[in-house]
C-alpha cells in the first residue's frame, strides 16, 4: 500500500500529488477554518485520484471544533473522504487512527492543557495495534522544533506512542521540522507541506507500507541528479582535453543521458550533434534542484539534522 502524506496545506491547492493508494492529510487544511475555506478544501481533496483520502483537523480548522454539526453536514456531501477525530479506519487490513488535539498554544482550535488529563485521555484512545497514527502535532522530542528552538511536541503523546507502538506516525504543525525520523519501532513523518512562511514548498512524503516494512521512498539522494552530475563531469573532462575525447567516452555520456530521458541512444546522439549535450544536462540539473523536488530530509531523533 502506497501512502502519500501531506499536512498543513493551509488552503493551498496547487500542490502536485504523486500517485498512491491512500492520501493522508494531517490537519491545517485551511488558514482559519471558515465554512467556505473548509468547503474549498473538501472539493479539492475529493477531486484527487487516490483510492482512499483520509484527513484530520488541525489547530487552524476551527469549523470542526466550533461547529461539528455543520462540519458533519458538509462532509456528508463528500462520501469519498474519511474525516477522523478520535476515530479509526481500516483499509486492506491496515489500521489508521486520527486525532486533532495538541498542547494548548494561544487560542487555537483543538487545544488541551499540556500534560493534562484531557490530553492523556485522548491519547489513551489510540488503540494498541494501530498501524498508522495521524495526529496534527508531533510527539515531544521528535521533529518538533522550529530551527534549533525548544521541543514543542506533546510529552503525553510521546509516552502513548512508546506503548501503542504504531508503525507510522504522521503529523505536521511544526512546519520547520518537516522530514522523517526513525525510532526502530516507529517511522515518524512530519509531512508539513508549508514552510514557516506558509509557502507550500515541501514535497509530499511517499511511504510504502507492507506487513513486513515501512519504507519512505523519497528520502534518498536523487539518483537522477547524481547521474546528471556525473555526466556533466565527464563532459567537462572531455572539453578540457578535446584531443583526448574518445568515441567510447562520448558514447557513454550520450548513453547515460538517453537512459535518464528514456529515449533511444541513437536518437539522442543525433539531437546532440544538432544542439549539444550541455544545455540538456544543465536544464535537467536545474529541474532536479527546484525546491519542490528536494528529497525529504531524514533527521536524528533529538533534533540535529542528518542531512
Ligand atoms: Fe500549520
Image: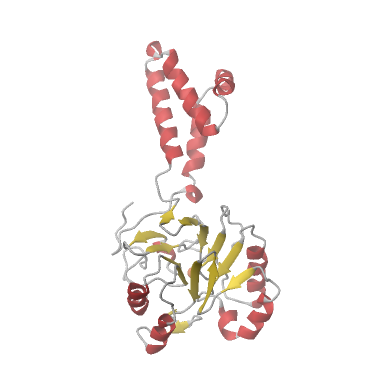
Left or right: 187 with respect to 94?
left
Please provide percent x and percent y for residue 130.
44, 71
Figure quadrant of residue 181: bottom left
Above or below: residue 147 compared with residue 282 = below
Residue at horizontal 50 percent and vertical 70 percent from the top:
96
Residue at horizontal 39 percent and vertical 63 percent from the top:
188
Could you say which is closer to the camera, residue 140 or residue 88? 88
Residue at horizontal 41 percent and vertical 33 percent from the top:
229
Left or right: 44 with respect to 154?
right
Residue, far right: 77
Above or below: residue 292 compared with residue 245 = below
Please provide percent x and percent y for residue 249.
42, 18
Please provide percent x and percent y for residue 175.
44, 64
Above or below: residue 155 compared with residue 52 = below
Left or right: 92 with respect to 223?
right
Query: How many numbered dots are placed on residues in this image?
Result: 0
Amino acid at each position: 500500500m502506497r501512502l502519500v502524506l501531506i499536512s498543513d496545506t493551509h488552503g493551498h491547492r496547487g500542490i502536485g500529488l504523486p500517485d498512491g493508494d491512500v492520501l493522508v492529510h494531517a490537519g491545517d487544511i485551511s488558514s482559519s477554518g471558515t465554512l467556505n475555506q473548509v468547503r474549498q478544501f473538501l472539493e479539492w481533496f475529493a477531486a484527487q485520484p487516490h483510492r482512499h483520502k483520509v484527513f484530520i483537523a488541525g489547530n487552524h480548522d476551527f469549523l470542526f471544533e466550533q461547529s461539528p454539526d455543520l462540519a458533519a453536514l458538509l462532509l456528508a456531501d463528500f462520501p469519498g473522504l474519511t474525516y477522523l477525530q478520535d476515530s479509526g479506519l481500516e483499509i486492506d487490513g491496515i489500521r489508521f487512527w486520527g486525532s486533532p488535539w495538541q498542547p494548548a498554544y494561544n487560542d487555537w482550535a483543538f487545544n488541551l492543557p499540556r500534560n493534562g488529563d484531557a490530553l492523556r485521555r485522548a491519547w489513551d484512545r489510540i488503540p494498541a495495534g494501530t498501524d498508522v497514527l495521524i495526529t496534527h502535532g508531533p510527539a515531544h522530542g521528535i521533529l518538533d522544533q522550529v530551527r534549533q528552538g525548544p521541543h514543542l511536541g506533546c510529552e503525553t503523546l510521546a509516552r502513548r506512542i512508546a506503548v501503542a507502538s504504531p508503525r507510522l506516525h504522521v503529523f505536521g504543525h511544526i512546519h520547520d521540522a518537516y522530514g522523517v525520523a526513525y525510532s526502530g519501532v516507529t517511522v515518524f513523518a512530519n509531512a508539513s507541506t508549508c514552510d514557516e512562511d506558509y509557502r507550500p514548498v515541501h514535497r509530499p512524503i511517499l511511504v510504502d507500507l507492507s506487513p513486513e516494512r515501512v519504507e519512505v521512498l523519497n528520502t534518498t539522494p536523487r539518483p537522477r541528479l547524481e547521474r546528471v552530475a556525473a555526466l556533466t563531469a565527464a563532459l567537462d573532462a572531455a572539453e578540457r582535453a578535446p584531443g583526448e575525447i574518445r568515441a567510447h567516452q562520448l558514447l557513454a555520456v550520450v548513453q547515460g543521458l538517453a537512459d535518464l530521458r528514456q529515449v533511444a541512444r541513437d536518437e539522442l546522439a543525433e539531437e546532440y550533434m544538432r544542439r549539444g549535450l550541455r544545455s540538456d544536462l544543465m536544464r535537467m540539473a536545474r529541474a532536479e534542484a527546484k525546491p519542490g523536488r528536494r528529497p525529504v530530509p531524514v533527521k536524528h531523533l533529538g533534533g540535529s539534522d542528518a542531512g
